[in-house]
């Protein structure tokens, strides 16, 4: 009777400490240690009894199998020279070995799949089932190789695989950067929301939020960032793994353990989601700067609890909007979220253990990581403190130090920075890591920067457009008519918090350096370009997805989406409840602090804009890792509608931008949980708990610091607690709220032309779309107008050396 090799029917698994391989002719079955021990601890269970397959396809009877001794028949020689003593070369096995963290989820037995394809079955081969039985007395496990016969007339029924996560062991993400960073396997039995994860999330959240709140008020500052949380969480998890007792209790019918085994990658991800994902929006909530400005600059006495309500409302609304955006940017394979890949690679590296001999040449990932990180930390002292010249390498300026034009063109601090050479990573990564952004996006960003800042900007400057030639070519602030930094206190009436028109007329209009004016011009083009690009390219897909009626070709899922189907999704009403509560808190905050004169119309309009922009923001961030710059639009709208109201301008900006940006960060958190196979409900709880704890603790630390340090936020504060972020917020409120966009960009003003760039921004994506419809096979089909316009807006404070060295590094490390 024809027989099918069982090794072609089952997927490999690594768990319970051993992996079993089919024996070679005339040899014993080989039981090999797995390449990584980092699996969740589970009490051993007896293996299920083997069940012979019936020839008629009916339910086979159950047959008991001896637990002590078994026999096996050696398989026939293979037609290819294949070393069965080593793992197969399937991408799934390599990926599981690569991450060392997740198994296929089978329990009781472990299998290695053959390299054969199930579509090309040889019906003359026998079937061999390798079963490893778990021993309860500490003796070596027994191994069974059982021959199973399959009738020739029913190969499909007999060859059908059990319900595993994928039908194809070679299946993986279609994107190489995802394949290199994310495992394509999952162990659903791995402990996730454990006592260790909750405890470390609490401790790390308290420590890191307190430290970052202090540094947020100081200049210069050394913030604790996401990679630091990953390392701290790993050290804490491994310590608790050694210190906590290994025992379990039964509570309300559920088993509970303080130490469920080795600290695993899913626990580690939960810690990062609760304590670290919010750091992607900054070291402190974005609206904390507004609270500081109201307190210290505008001398408004805030009522107890207002700050917490104000910040929490925007973050809850962001969490609510994340539910709408998650349906579009989490399951899709092409929504890769590049910044998540570096975190995934770091998490998997820390939990991978030693690489198996024969798979990798050189040191293990973990050993290499532990060597490079300290060396990189030591290297920062060379360009930062010991020999700062290597940070800039302005060789041409060293040759002609007194040539003004040479320094304006090639200077890397106050010039255009036309150079590519720097040995300072802080300069290279100033606008973002060049190792995470896709290369096509880097080409868009650097190409646009060259056109606007290295070609067009010198032409405008040396022809004195916007009366810019008497000011520095590169600057970070505004100037008066004497080319001195603009003094806003000379035009502000501190009693009424209104503009003193007489003092303004006597003093000076606000002049901008040409670099700032160019950035504002680009900033006018970004919102309409981004909205038009999203509507034309992604709009129909998003509309059908939000209606729940997607077409078959709208998007493609990958192995990770298939693996996550086993976990229940977050109910939409959870997100809806968070959004409604956030809106209620926003209204309550506006009514709770009447001295700020916050119109409810401003609150509702800001929320409406956040709803509109959350999808375009995620659309760009999911594909490039960039955040969109719509600050200018968000400051202009309230500046026109509520002219002369700087406090209203700040409230509007916080509710719109903070809601939108936090919503994007929460969607990115859901995608990280998607990559690391975290149940979506756990991801929701982790992020929700993180914002509740983080907001309350940071407000508390800010209040204690302000009470203990009377001269905090003063320019000459002895500990350098000068509140730099608050001062930037304060200046923006003066320019856009007090002076107002009408005086700065209205008819008859110096900068009357830049606002018309918005029409250019709305037209360019439409022209490119029409061109691609007419000529679909030209290079223009890969051109993204929104990415190109959004990329160079880091100037200022970034200069040319930040963009050029960033792009050069991306070219060097391009695969």
Image (cartoon, grey):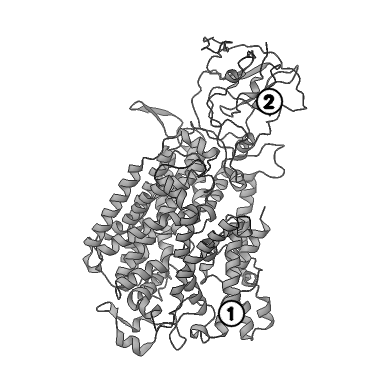
Q: Tell me the element at label 1.
A: helix
User: Residue 408 location, x and y as percent?
Assistant: 60, 81
**Image height of 119 relative to 449, above or below:** above
Label 2: how many residues lie within 10 Å, few (<14), some (14-19) or many (20+)? few
Q: Where does residue 169 sit, x and y in percent of width and height?
A: 61, 32
- Assign a secondary structure to mark 2: helix
Q: Which of labels 2 and 1 is toward the front?
A: 2
Say which label, 2 or 1, has the lower sequence index.
2
- Inspect this view and state whether residue 242 appears: no
Tell me which residue sits at (57%, 38%) in the image.
Answer: 184
| Among the 4 quarters of the image, the one containing residue 658 | bottom left
Dot 1 alpha-carbon crowd within 10 angstroms: few under 14, some 14 to 19, many 20 or more:
some
The answer to which of 27 and 750 lies nearer the viewer is 750
Residue pointed to by mark 1: 458
Question: Count of labels shown?
Answer: 2
* Quarter of the rendering containing residue 596: bottom left
Query: Residue 572: x percent and y percent?
Result: 36, 42
On the rendered structure, is 291 left or right of 480? left
Q: Residue at x 63, y 53 (%)?
A: 372
* Badge number at residue 120: 2
Q: Which mark is residue 186?
A: none
Marks 2/1: CA–CA distance: 66 Å
Residue 231 position, x and y percent, is 52, 49
Pick the residue in front: 165 or 219.
165
């Amino acid at each position: 009777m024809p027989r099918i090799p069982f090794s072609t029917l089952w997927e490999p698994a690594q768990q319970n400490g051993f992996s079993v391989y089919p024996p070679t002719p005339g040899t014993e079955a080989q039981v090999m240690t797995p390449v990584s021990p980092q699996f969740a601890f589970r009490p051993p269970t007896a293996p299920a009894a083997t069940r012979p397959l019936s020839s008629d396809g009916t339910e086979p009877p159950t047959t008991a199998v001896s637990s002590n001794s078994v026999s096996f028949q050696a398989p026939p020689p293979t037609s290819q020279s294949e070393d069965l003593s080593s793992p197969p070369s399937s991408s799934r096995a390599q990926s599981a070995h690569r991450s060392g963290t997740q198994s296929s989820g089978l329990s009781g037995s472990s299998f290695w799949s053959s390299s054969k394809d199930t579509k090309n079955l040889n019906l003359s081969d026998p079937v061999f089932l390798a079963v490893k039985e778990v021993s309860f007395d500490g003796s070596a496990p027994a191994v069974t190789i059982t021959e199973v016969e399959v009738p020739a007339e029913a190969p499909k029924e007999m060859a059908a695989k059990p319900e595993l996560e994928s039908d194809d062991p070679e299946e993986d993400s279609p994107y190489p950067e995802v394949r290199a960073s994310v495992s394509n396997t999952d162990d659903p039995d791995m402990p996730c929301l454990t006592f260790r994860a909750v405890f470390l999330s609490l401790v790390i959240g308290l420590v890191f939020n307190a430290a970052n709140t202090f540094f947020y008020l100081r200049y210069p500052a050394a913030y604790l960032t996401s990679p630091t949380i990953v390392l701290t969480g790993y050290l804490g998890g491994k310590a608790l793994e050694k210190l906590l007792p290994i025992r379990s209790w039964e509570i309300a019918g559920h088993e509970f353990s303080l130490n469920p085994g080795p600290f695993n990658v899913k626990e580690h991800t939960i810690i990062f989601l609760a304590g670290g994902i919010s750091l992607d929006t900054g070291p402190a909530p974005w609206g904390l700067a507004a609270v500081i400005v109201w307190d210290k600059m505008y001398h408004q006495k805030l009522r107890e609890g207002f700050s917490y309500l104000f910040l929490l409302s925007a973050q809850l609304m962001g969490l609510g909007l994340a539910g709408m955006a998650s349906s579009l940017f989490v399951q899709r394979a092409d929504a890769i979220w590049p910044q998540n890949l570096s975190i995934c690679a770091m998490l998997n590296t820390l939990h991978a253990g030693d690489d198996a001999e024969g798979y990798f040449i050189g040191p293990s990932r973990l050993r290499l990581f532990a060597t490079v990180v300290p060396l990189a930390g030591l290297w920062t002292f060379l360009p930062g403190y010991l020999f700062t010249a290597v940070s800039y390498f302005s060789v041409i300026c060293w040759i002609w130090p007194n040539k003004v034009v040479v320094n304006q063109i090639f200077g890397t601090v106050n010039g255009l920075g036309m150079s590519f050479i720097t040995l300072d990573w802080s300069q290279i990564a100033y606008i973002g890591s060049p190792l995470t952004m896709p290369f096509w996006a880097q080409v868009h960003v650097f190409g646009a920067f060259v056109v606007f800042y290295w070609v067009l900007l010198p032409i405008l400057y040396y022809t004195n457009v916007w009366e810019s030639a008497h000011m520095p070519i590169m600057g970070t602030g505004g100037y008066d008519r004497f080319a001195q930094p603009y003094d806003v206190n000379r035009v502000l009436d501190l009693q009424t918090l209104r503009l003193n028109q007489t003092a303004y007329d006597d003093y000076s209009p606000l002049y901008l350096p040409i670099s700032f004016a160019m950035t504002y011009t680009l900033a006018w083009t970004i919102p309409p370009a981004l909205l038009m690009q999203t509507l034309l390219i992604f709009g129909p897909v998003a509309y059908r997805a939000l209606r729940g009626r997607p077409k078959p070709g709208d998007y493609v899922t990958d192995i990770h989406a298939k693996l996550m189907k086993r976990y229940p999704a977050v109910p939409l009403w959870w997100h809806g409840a968070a959004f409604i509560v956030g809106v209620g808190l926003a209204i309550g905050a506006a009514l709770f602090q009447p001295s700020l004169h916050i119109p409810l119309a401003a609150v509702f309009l800001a929320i409406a804009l956040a709803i509109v922009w959350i999808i375009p923001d995620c659309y760009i961030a999911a594909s490039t890792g960039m955040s969109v710059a719509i600050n200018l639009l968000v400051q202009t709208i309230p500046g026109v509608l509520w002219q002369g109201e700087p406090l209203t301008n700040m409230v509007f900006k916080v509710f719109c931008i903070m809601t939108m940006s936090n919503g994007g960060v929460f969607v990115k958190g859901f995608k990280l949980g998607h990559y690391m196979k975290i149940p979506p409900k756990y991801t929701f709880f982790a992020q929700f708990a993180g914002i509740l704890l983080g907001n309350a603790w940071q407000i508390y630390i800010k209040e204690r610091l302000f009470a203990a340090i009377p001269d905090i936020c003063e320019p000459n504060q002895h500990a350098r607690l000068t509140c730099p972020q608050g001062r930037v917020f304060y200046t923006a409120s003066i320019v856009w709220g007090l002076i107002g966009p009408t005086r700065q960009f209205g008819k008859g003003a110096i900068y009357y032309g830049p606002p018309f760039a918005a029409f250019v921004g709305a037209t360019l994506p439409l022209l490119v779309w029409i061109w691609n419809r007419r000529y679909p096979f030209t290079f223009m089909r890969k051109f993204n107008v929104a990415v190109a316009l959004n990329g160079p807006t880091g100037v200022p404070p970034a200069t040319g050396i930040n963009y050029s060295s960033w792009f050069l590094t991306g070219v060097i490390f391009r695969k």
